[in-house]
Image (spheres, rainbow, N blue to C red):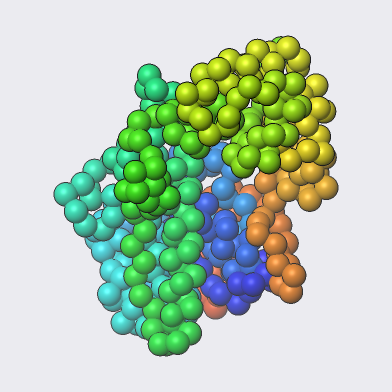
Amino acid sequence: MTTGPLAGIRVVELGGIGPGPFAAMVLAELGADVVRVDRPGERNVLALQGGLRRSRPSIAVDLKHPDGVAVVRRLLGDADVLLEGFRPGVLERLGLDPAELLAGNPGLVVGRMTGWGQDGPWAQRAGHDITYAALSGTLHALGPRERPVAPVPLVGDFGGGAMYLVAGVLAALVSRGVTGRGQVVDAAMVDGSAHLLSMVHGMLGAGAWRDERAVNLVDGGAPFYDVYECADGRFVAVGALEPQFWAELVAGLGVGGEFEQADRATWPAQRAAFTAAFASRTRDEWAAVFEGTDACVAPVLSLAEASAHPHLAARRAFVEGPGGTPVPAPTPRFSGTPQVGPGAEPVPGADTTTYLSARGFTAAEVDALLASGAVAQA
């Protein structure tokens, strides 16, 4: 990447799975010069097939080999950012203690992605998106009244994890521009998952939210903010919160003259009327009815359907990915420093020799590293 608002920022990513690679991909597609440091012989399916390897080269380095650690330390000597996602203490045991790295490169920003944070009684526990969502209270708020529903890994991994790591790294870079000094960014998925619920906690504190599922204004409790099944077994999403939007909803459905939107006593009758109406036509028929209105009704599209929707197609929200299939395009968009991408998705170690050579390693040094097993070329 040579364009984008982060052009000129050099990032070293210690390869992992989930939120760390996603954060690295975001930075790369914003224009940063990111290199992914993979383990030689990487076999983890999520690391290989998670769709997050794109837009940056990969070098294979054995971080258990002292010469491999020396390679990374050398790369970090003039880097702007280090991204890592090990459990607390692992980076230090590998010989890459952030305090020592900052002593050698005072402007370095060390972005540390963990599930539970760098400290606290659960810091060393294993976890995944669902466990961070559970402990943060987020999972409690998701799903029908009967039971919470496991979400796809957006809450902890990507929303509460990767995007907070990106925000923290960018904030630390801005701070460095003022102070001249880097710092450590402690991004924890459980912290981010809790922070994403700030509005809900605010409403709860104000008495405007009940600590239950599917009984509130924007969690499926209100009949005008929910999902309805249509005649073909597919679904539409309804978000007609404002009175003027609700008026367009009931007009399009041909129901509701006897209801007061905000009167909770009428919500069961509203829901019954909406359910019966939506069940009378197919999803796409209802999409046509509400096309061009402000009723806030949208078809629930499958992953395969989304990329072909006229609006998303017009905005090129999906583009052809490295494998030839549609993938989400880099976002957000910039008027003065447009990004390019998505780029290639290399196998681990595909760029070891070329990248190290470009970073000042001599041919003899690269050959010695390959011979020792400290690095590997795919």
Against 144, residue 187 (above or below) is: below
Which residue is nearer to you in this view: 29 or 76? 29
Percent x, y for residue 325? 73, 38
Task: Examine the image and state in which quarter residue 337 appears.
Answer: bottom right
Q: Nearer the viewer, residue 369 or 328?
A: 328
Say above or below: 281 vs 375.
Answer: above
- Identify the residue at horizontal 69%, vertical 16% (top origin): 277
**Residue at the extreme front of the image, as rendered:** 258
Residue at 75 percent of width and 28 percent of height: 251
Q: Quadrant of the N terminus?
A: bottom right
Residue 203 in sight from this viewpoint: yes
Q: Position of residue 312 (x, y in %)?
A: 76, 44
Total numbered badges shown on the rendered structure: 0
Q: Which x, y percent locates residue 123?
A: 23, 50
Q: Residue at x 60, y 72 (%)?
A: 6
Which residue lies at the image location 44% right of the left edge and 60% below the top edge? Answer: 165
Q: Quadrant of residue 69?
A: bottom left
| 182 or 206: nearer the viewer | 206
Say above or below: 337 vs 37. Answer: below
Q: In screen coordinates, is 122 left or right of 272? A: left
Residue that lies at the very extreme toward the left in this rendered image = 121
Residue 71 in sight from this viewpoint: no
- The image shows residue 116 at horizontal and vertical percentages of 28, 49
Tell me if 100 is positioned left or right of 284 in this view: left
Judge left or right: residue 154 versus residue 278. Answer: left
Up-down relation of residue 300 to residue 92 (above or below): above
